[in-house]
Amino acid sequence: MIPVAPALRQHAADPQLPAAPPPRWQQLWREAVRDPRELLTLLGLEGAVTDISEAAAQQFPLRVPRGFVAKMRHGDPHDPLLRQVLPLDDEMKPMPGFAFDAVGDAAAKAADGVIRKYQGRALLVTTGSCAVHCRYCFRRHFDYASETAAADHWREAVDLIRADAGLDEVILSGGDPWSLSTAKLTELTDALADVPHLKRLRIHTRLPVVLPERVDAPLLAWIRSLPWPVTVVLHANHANEIDCSVRQACRALRATGATLLNQAVLLRGVNDSVDALAALSERSHEAGVLPYYLHQLDRVQGAAHFEVGDDEARQLHGALAARLSGYLVPRLVREVAGDPGKRPL
């Protein structure tokens, strides 16, 4: 195992040494925009958006890194990146068919922070923290305070995985697992390293897209040190999210030997056109990321205004398949509670 951040460990052991500065990504994390009105001011949209919801912002606070804000179109209240993060009145309208637990996480709980839905796989809810709060998030109502696999140094989660020889893949999710320190991630993977039946590690993260500075030297060293094949599933919904800094982060991740995939969510007003979806697939591939899933919206309370109907989704997907090479066309799927896998549409 490659040691992670030895200087930080040395400082912790010797109180006479000055504290090391935090990694740059953590500083940028702390500087995220949290006030909807500040966000609109930064974009020159003061007074241009009248349906901001204070109640929605209290229920699910705004958080967006300033680097992601810089990708938004100045003066455009309909910018597809802005729409993903701005709390609006529509979120507070109860809608039939939309639930607090849209994908059946509670019923699939196997231990604190461990979700088992599919054969051979265990998903660890590593943390409730994210660098960006997406308004359509299917876990926006999740009780992270009591459902985190990191409790007690991952002991219950690791014991469950070790005891079940049928589990061969672990999925790190959240929140965002890369919001954890690299030292904390190392603690987890060190504990998993002696599980003989574990064959693969999968990581679901949005940080390389919204805070690419997270892909730093210690994180890359940690990935290289892992004893399993690693798949990193990114989450970008629009081509404008993938700029040169994201491409650089993806290049560094690929150099570790990791496989990079992208999963997007079909969102009204964000990517609900063939042109937007084609641009996303092409920009992802240019960054070395293979389009993987295009999810129909998980029907979580507060996100109904993002929904695209199934018939329209199929038409868009068919037109996308007619335009692009097959390997650039993500699978159109929906997650249904109790199904043995993602349901193709």
Image: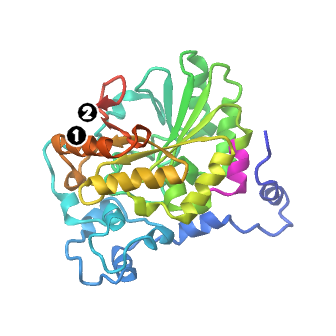
Q: Position of residue 210 (x, y in %)?
A: 49, 61
Quadrant location, the N terminus: top right
- The residue at which mark 1 appears reads as 314
Q: Earlier in the sequence, mark 1 or mark 2?
A: 1
The amino acid marked with disc number 1 is: Arg
Quadrant location, the C terminus: top left
- Indicate the quadrant where residue 320 lies: top left
Q: Secondary structure at mark 1?
A: helix
In the displayed structure, does residue 164 sit left or right of residue 81? right
Mark 1 neighbour class, 10 Å CA radius: few under 14, some 14 to 19, many 20 or more: few
The amino acid marked with disc number 2 is: Leu
> Residue 52: which numbered mark, if any?
none
Seen from this angle, which residue lies furthest top? 165
Residue 100: tell me if it is visible.
no
Mark 2 neighbour class, 10 Å CA radius: few under 14, some 14 to 19, many 20 or more: some
Circle 1/circle 2 CB separation < 8 Å:
yes
> What is the span of residues highlighted in magenta in the rendered image?
215-223
Residue at left offset 19%, top offset 40%: 310
Q: Position of residue 303 (x, y in %)?
A: 25, 53
Q: Is residue 116 above or below residue 270?
A: above
- The residue at which mark 2 appears reads as 345
Q: Position of residue 219 (x, y in %)?
A: 68, 51
Residue 227: tell me if it is visible.
yes
Residue 221, magenta (yes or no): yes
In the displayed structure, does residue 77 sit left or right of residue 10? left
Tell which of 260 and 318 is nearer to you. Answer: 318
Q: Position of residue 29 (x, y in %)?
A: 55, 65
